Image: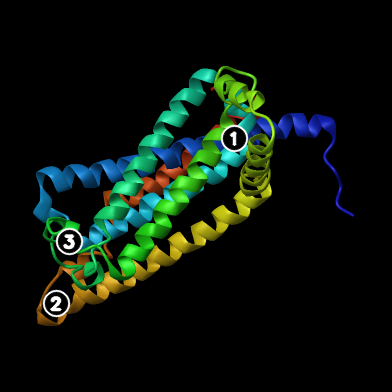
Amino acid sequence: MARKLTKQQRKFWIPVIQKVVLGLSDQQIITGGAILLTAFIRLAFNRAQLSVYHLNIVSDMAWLASNTHLVTIVVLQRYFQKNFGLRVVRVTLMLLLAAGLIAVSIFTAHQYDYDYFSCPAECLIGELSSNIGGIPMRWMIVSIVFICTDYPGAIVAICDWNSWEFPSIKKFYNSRNGVLKLILKSAWFFVYDIYWSDDFSIGGLVAWFGLGMYWAISDRITGHQVIAYGIEQGGQEGQSENEWGFGQFLPMFLISLNALGAVDVIYGIEV
């Protein structure tokens, strides 16, 4: 039989795990936002330098960062509930990331998105309004549905129901009676107690993460098939995609920061 942790052991390990998860959470939401912001800046000021392929990869990486961050929120609910200032900052960052994800989902919804991976992204974005369709449009709908259902759940989860956030909602609910109150109660039970429950959220987020991995791998394979086609004619772009440089090594080193935070807590160093 597995040995249960004693109260003293739990008291020791909970802050350690919380520190690691919090570091991962901060890292993922900042990384996802930075990736999207960089892509949007390049689209606005240097459009020809960002291909359709790389815009799709940006979308995939931001999606994975977003999913990882939402998983950490399940663990950090009580931490944010106890810290009003941190909660406000985190909700603000989450809303900004959600808006960025919706925007990039729309930018990659051109019906010929997968056929023009080697072209500058501005070519398809410029004619996007009349060409949203096909499989890219379906994936755009899937992405937006996920964002509009799971992000509100994560935000509600880290809010403190005993604070000022929800008095108006409570007042409205308590003032209702009869059929309307029953409908509201049933809807809230389904959404909050079932769909936004921890078990359902973790299962759903794992499934969404798997979908994000599928998108990333699929886009990379398709992109390399298109871009690396020119290698036979002496092109180098496909080869350079696999080279490791500063931009590849830096994220690997940043991951170690979470382990350093755990070591600091273990040895009683205030951070």
Residue at 34% across, 41% down: 99
What type is the residue that disc 2 sits on? Gly
| Any part of residue 212 in sight | yes
* Residue annotated with mark 1: 157
| Between 238 and 124, the one nearer to me in the picture | 124
What residue occupies the far right of the structure in this picture? 1
* Residue annotated with mark 3: 130
| Any part of residue 19 in sight | no
Residue count near mark 3 (Cα–Cα under 10 Å), binned few <14, some 14–19, many ≥20: few
Protein image colouring? rainbow
Checking the image for residue 66, the label placed there is none
Quadrant of the drawing holding the N terminus:
bottom right
Which quadrant would residue 204 be assigned to in this image?
Answer: bottom right
Q: Position of residue 130 (x, y in %)?
A: 17, 61
Q: Position of residue 261 (x, y in %)?
A: 54, 33
Indicate whether 219 appears above or below 92: below
Q: Is residue 150 left or right of residue 82?
A: left
Instruction: Return the disc, 3 or 2, that comes first in the chain's sequence.
Output: 3
Q: Position of residue 189 (x, y in %)?
A: 68, 42
Label 1 to label 3, Cα distance in Å? 39 Å
Indicate whether 175 appears above or below 246: above
Residue at 12% across, 73% down: 235
Instruction: Return the disc, 2 or 1, that comes first in the chain's sequence.
Output: 1
What type is the residue that disc 3 sits on? Ser
* Residue annotated with mark 2: 230
